[in-house]
Every structure is written in structure tokens, then in C-alpha cells.
Image: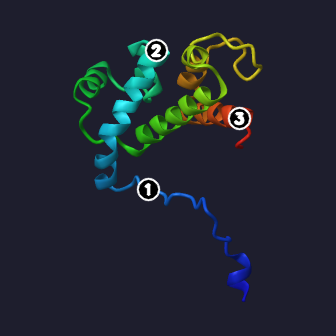
């Protein structure tokens, strides 16, 4: 009886199962589409390559351009999580704002006390995964899904 009390009720919108990013097979399957999304977002946002490298966790210039050219390889869990957060940020911005503002937002100096005048890209590049998570939560809260 206790198990039924703790069970989550089923609904029309059950969450997707978590993907195990610790397995090379799953990371290899997700890497090409993740890289395509990543570089498309950077292009839409007008992000310079040097900032793209920083957002990816400080990868080398050579590795960055190999990934950009081939969209191949197998990303590690950290890089896939970073891309996932950026995809969520991109989606939230496009829900909240017009396409023009959504594409410019990440590169505009921001007066929100969280950013202290920095651009969101600079905040995320300096803050790494925790910084990206903060930006994602901020935007999700603004759109009412937090």
C-alpha cells in the first residue's frame, strides 16, 4: 500500500526517460545532432568562435574547428550537458521574445543584477555549467515553467 501512495500518478505528459550519457554508445548517437544544434545556435546568436570554445568548456582551437567542420566524434558528458542547456536557453528565448530579440539577447549587456552588466554569453562562459544552469532557470522562470 505504501508504494501506491508514493507512486506518481500517470498523466498525458509523462516525462521522457533520462538518457544515460555515461555510455559511449548514447554519446556517439547524440553527438552529431548536438553539434549541429550548437553551431546553429552560435550562428543565430552571432557568437564568435573564441566564445564558442569557452562555452564548450575551453576546448582547443584545433578541436573546435574539427568539430565545426565534421560534426563528428564523440562528445563527453560535460559537453553534451552544456549543449543541452544552450538548446533549452535558445528555446526559452524564442518563446519569450521575438526572433530578432531572442537571437540578440545572449550578446547584449544585461542590467539584471545577476549579470552585472555582462552579456549572458560572458556570464555563461565564465560560470561554466553552473552559470548556464542559472541562465536556463532564469529564463524558464520568466516563461512560467520553473
- Give the CA distance from mark 3 to mark 2: 24 Å
Return the x and y of residue 49 as percentages of the image width and height: 38, 15
Return the x and y of residue 21 as percentages of the image width and height: 40, 52
Res. 143 mark: 3
Q: Residues within 10 Å of mark 1 (few under 14, many from 20)?
A: few
Q: Is disc 2 placed on a helix, strand or loop?
A: loop
Q: Are marks 1 and 3 in contact (CB under 8 Å)?
A: no
**Image vertical order of residue 124 relative to residue 6, above or below:** above
Say which label, 1 or 3, has the lower sequence index. 1
Q: Is disc 3 placed on a helix, strand or loop?
A: loop
Of residue 23 and residue 1, the one placed in the foreground of this image is 1
Of residue 59 and residue 146, the one placed in the foreground of this image is 146
Q: Which residue is mark 2?
A: 47
Q: Nearer the viewer, mark 1 or mark 3?
A: 3
Looking at the figure, which quarter contains the C terminus? top right
Seen as rendered, the residue at the extreme right is: 113
Q: Is disc 1 placed on a helix, strand or loop?
A: loop
What is the quadrant of residue 31 in the picture?
top left
Q: Nearer the viewer, mark 3 or mark 2?
A: 3
Residue at the spot 66% in from the left edge and 27% down from the top edge: 96
Residue at the spot 49% in from the left edge and 60% down from the top edge: 17
On the rendered structure, is 97 left or right of 60? right
Q: Which residue is mark 1?
A: 19
Return the x and y of residue 24 as percentages of the image width and height: 30, 53
- Give the CA distance from mark 2 to mark 1: 29 Å
Return the x and y of residue 130 as percentages of the image width and height: 60, 36
Amino acid at each position: 500500500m505504501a508504494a501506491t501512495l508514493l507512486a506518481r500518478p500517470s498523466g498525458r505528459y509523462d516525462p521522457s526517460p533520462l538518457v544515460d550519457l555515461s555510455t559511449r554508445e548514447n554519446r556517439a548517437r547524440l553527438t552529431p545532432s548536438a553539434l549541429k544544434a550548437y553551431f546553429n545556435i552560435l550562428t543565430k546568436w552571432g557568437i564568435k568562435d573564441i566564445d564558442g570554445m569557452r562555452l564548450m568548456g575551453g576546448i582547443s582551437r584545433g578541436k573546435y574547428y574539427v568539430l565545426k567542420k565534421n560534426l563528428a566524434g564523440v562528445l563527453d558528458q560535460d559537453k553534451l550537458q552544456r549543449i543541452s542547456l544552450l538548446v533549452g536557453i535558445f528555446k526559452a528565448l524564442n518563446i519569450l521574445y521575438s526572433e530578432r530579440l531572442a537571437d540578440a539577447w545572449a550578446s547584449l549587456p544585461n542590467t539584471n543584477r545577476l549579470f552585472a552588466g555582462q552579456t549572458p554569453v560572458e556570464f555563461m562562459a565564465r560560470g561554466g555549467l553552473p552559470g548556464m544552469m542559472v541562465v536556463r532557470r532564469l529564463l524558464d522562470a520568466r516563461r512560467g515553467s520553473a
